[in-house]
Amino acid sequence: ITFTLHTQYATRLWNGRDLVKNEAGEVVTSSILSIPNALSLLSQIQQAAEQDDPYADDYLLRFEQKVLGFRKEMQDMTWRMVNLYSEKIPENFQIERCANIAPIQYPIFVNTQLGYQLLYLLADFDSLARTVMTASHIALLTKDDAYDWLESGAKLIRRAFGVLENYRNSGITRQDALENNARYQAAVKRMKYTLTPDVLSGTTRATFAPTIKKSSLAESDDNGSVEVQITANKTE
């Protein structure tokens, strides 16, 4: 599978951003999670969910709700921009969206279905960015308006990242919760919230949640790694 991005805006979100502090130790620029790191976190959460960790299931459920909802919002934004084209461009013009003559390509393997949904969301943003950049170039949008559109789209992806950035491994199973043992009580304090009964029981799980393996949390899963390869091609 090869993933292609045409815009610098989408490529920046793929690469993320490092935290920057000044000499006094104050944060000058906040960090932004990269797509490879987000995929790695999703892989960790999925492995925990496979081992019957109810908190991992809760993270997957919340992430799925966010990413699927944000995909719809992103596509709606692109559709509104397409309607702007049809309303404001005279019929004398035949216009195609801008495309990069040397787009950056990422050969990838992702072992989580929700990881692919995250990539689809980034692809939706890349499509929106191409549409907005074309609209700005042909004077349908001012530069400030184009920036607002792009920032609104990028914010959706950053909000999806936010669910993953807060992830902690609880180290428990549903059996621990059923027994209400010391391990479960410690996990509740560490996680700082109590799960709803439907998530705790496993009645409600993400649509793309993995099959639960009835094995020990201590067992390793060599198939749980995420591989992301990046070519040397650069977006101009």
Image (cartoon, rainbow, N blue to C red):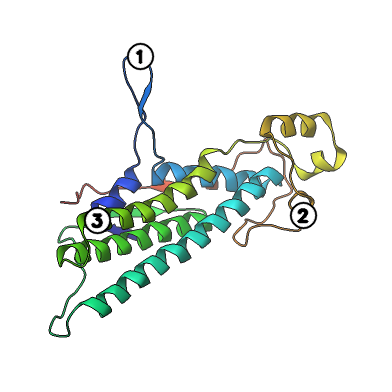
Of 149 and 118, the residue lying toward us: 149
- Looking at the rendered image, the quarter that the N terminus falls into is bottom left
Q: Nearer the viewer, mark 1 or mark 2?
A: 1
Res. 143 image quadrant: bottom left
Residue indicated by mark 1 = 24
Asked if residue 35 lies left or right of residue 56, the reply is: left
Q: Indicate which disc residue 7 carries.
A: 3
**Amino acid type, mark 2:** Asp
Tell me, yes or no, whether the two marked residues, 3 and 2, touch with CB atoms within 8 Å. no
Q: Residues within 10 Å of mark 3 (few under 14, many from 20)?
A: many
Of 198 and 156, the residue lying toward us: 156
Query: Going 44% across and 53% down the picture, which residue do you hit?
Result: 156
From mark 1 to mark 3, how far is it between C-alphas?
35 Å
Percent across and percent down for residue 159 are 47, 48
Query: Going 51% across and 39% down the picture, which residue do you hit?
Result: 165
Q: Indicate which disc residue 198 carries.
A: 2
Residue most toward the bottom?
Answer: 91
Q: Nearer the viewer, mark 1 or mark 3?
A: 1
From mark 1 to mark 2, how far is it between C-alphas?
47 Å
Query: Going 38% across and 56% down the picture, which residue do you hit?
Result: 122
Task: Return the disc, 3 or 2, that comes first in the chain's sequence.
Answer: 3
Q: Secondary structure at mark 1?
A: loop
Q: Secondary structure at mark 3?
A: loop
Percent across and percent down for residue 119 are 41, 57
Residue most toward the right?
Answer: 179
